[in-house]
Image: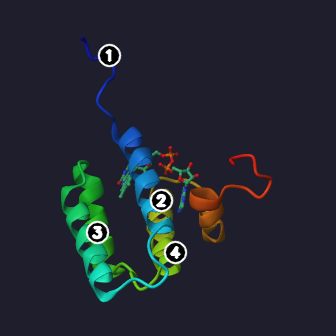
Amino acid sequence: SQIRECPPDVKQLGRATWTFLHTMAAYYPDHPSNQEQRLMRSFLSSFSRFYPCGHCAEHLQEEIKKWPPRVESRQQLGMWMCEMHNKVNKMLGKDPFDCNKIDERWRDGPIDGSCD
Ligand code: FAD
């Protein structure tokens, strides 16, 4: 059968990837073991090496060097991811996202229950 979908461009890839990254952070343990913290650090480091948008990956690697991932808790990782995304938003001229809303956006949904 013929494939009718196009490969993702930088924006589609970005949206799908942020969905994954924020959702992963939203379900990271509240009290991760030392091994889990090590694995998350190593995942993010590998991820930034192989992210399939060359200039995005380079930029991300530089940011990770300056602002190492905070893997000590779910709350910390979620905030770190939000701050990273906001750096990219800023670079692209987009409005910042309110990092107090990450659980509502990526885990719990709005209080009106419209996503339940
Ligand atoms: P996205 O920015 O993809 O956001 C998706 C949804 O996430 C938003 O609708 C919002 O609900 C939520 N959101 C927004 N900000 C935050 C936040 N701070 N925290 C939590 N949730 C948030 N594109 C480039 O052109 N150049 C780059 O250098 C570049 N680097 C990237 C690096 C990485 C690691 C990733 C994952 C993507 C990168 N992109 C880059 C893609 C870019 O960030 C966007 O994904 C793309 O422009 C599509 O934007 P969008 O407006 O659909 O929303």
How many dots with numbers?
A: 4
**Of labels 4 and 2, the one closer to you:** 2
Q: Amino acid at mark 1?
A: Arg
* Circle 2 residue: 23
**Of labels 3 and 2, the one closer to you:** 2
Q: CA distance from mark 4 to mark 3?
A: 15 Å
Q: Nearer the viewer, residue 40 or 18?
A: 40
Horizontal side, residue 82 vs residue 69: left or right: right
Q: Amino acid at mark 2?
A: Thr
Q: Quadrant of residue 28?
A: bottom left
> Which secondary structure, mark 4?
helix
Q: Residue at x 25, y 63 (%)?
A: 48
Q: Residues within 10 Å of mark 3 (few under 14, many from 20)?
A: some
Q: Nearer the viewer, residue 10 or 72?
A: 72
Q: Amino acid at mark 3?
A: Leu
Q: Residues within 10 Å of mark 2 (few under 14, many from 20)?
A: some
Q: Residue at x 38, y 51 (%)?
A: 17
User: What percent of the width, then of the height, locates residue 7?
Assistant: 29, 30
Quadrant occupied by the N terminus: top left
* Circle 1 residue: 4
* Circle 3 residue: 44
* Circle 4 residue: 79
Callout 4 touching callout 3 (CB < 8 Å): no
Callout 2 touching callout 1 (CB < 8 Å): no
Q: CA distance from mark 1 to mark 4?
A: 38 Å
User: Which numbered disc flags the more N-terminal residue, 2 or 1?
Assistant: 1
Q: Residue at x 36, y 80 (%)?
A: 67
User: What percent of the width, then of the height, locates residue 84?
Assistant: 44, 68
